[in-house]
Amino acid sequence: MIRRLVTFSLAAATLAASGAWAQEASAVGVWKTIDDETGKPKSLVRISENNGELRGKIEKLFRDASEDQNPKCDKCEGALKDQPILGMTIITGMKKDGSEYNGGQILDPANGKVYRSKMSVTDGGKKLDVRGYIGVPLLGRTQTWLRAE
């Protein structure tokens, strides 16, 4: 009886551990963006999922006291022209594709340009590699965002 209980307990623990290993870290959450030039935090972006599509919205800006605390996207075009950057949706259309997220777009409020994008979660869910590109992924750049939660 005890042998069966021990065997059952070991089997249950093994199944539970393999299930935890099988779970991948998700891009959903709050991410701290880092300025490429200064290495300082630039913003917090909340990525959420709705019907299998990821969207990212700027939730907080880290700005010096001498800077405008509520900047507008003066270089954006269309409906986003002169809209507040805080609260702006900058990531749209990202969908899970194997271990990456693809098929979406990312807006760079600094220059108003929209790029094709792909993302991958790394370092056990602590980092998010976000690549913006024109045409093919080879023609772009990658930023590493840090999980803020």
Image (tube, rainbow, N blue to C red):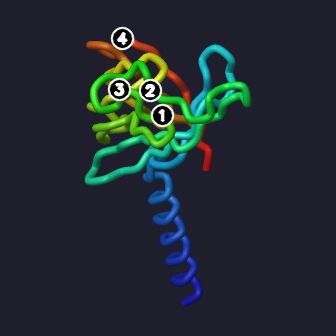
- Which callout, 4 or 1, points to the residue nearer the camera? 1
What separation in Å lies between label 3 and label 4 (alpha carbons)?
Answer: 11 Å
Image x and y of residue 109, in percent = 45, 25
Question: Quick one: label 2, few (<14), some, or many (20+) residues within 10 Å?
Answer: many
Question: Quick one: label 1, few (<14), some, or many (20+) residues within 10 Å?
Answer: many
Location of residue 103 (image quadrant): top left
Residue beneath the point at 51% across and 83% down: 4
- Which callout, 2 or 3, points to the residue nearer the camera? 2
Q: Amino acid at mark 2?
A: Cys
Whichever of labels 4 and 2 marks the residue nearer the N terminus, that label is 2
Residue identifier under label 4: 138
Q: Which of 99/60 is in front?
A: 60
Image x and y of residue 138, in percent = 36, 11
Residue identifier under label 1: 85
Image marks 3 and 4: residues in contact by CB distance under 8 Å:
no
Residue identifier under label 2: 73
Question: Quick one: label 4, few (<14), some, or many (20+) residues within 10 Å?
Answer: few
What separation in Å lies between label 2 and label 1 (alpha carbons)?
Answer: 6 Å
Which SS class for mark 2? loop
Furthest residue toward bottom? 1
Whichever of labels 2 and 1 marks the residue nearer the N terminus, that label is 2
What separation in Å lies between label 4 and label 1 (alpha carbons)?
Answer: 28 Å
Residue beneath the point at 37% across and 43% down: 55
Image marks 2 and 3: residues in contact by CB distance under 8 Å:
no
Image marks 2 and 1: residues in contact by CB distance under 8 Å:
yes
Location of residue 105 (image quadrant): top left
Residue 22: assigned label? none
Image marks 4 and 2: residues in contact by CB distance under 8 Å:
no
Image x and y of residue 26, in percent = 45, 47
Image vertical order of residue 133 relative to residue 67, above or below: above
Whichever of labels 4 and 1 marks the residue nearer the N terminus, that label is 1
Residue identifier under label 3: 117
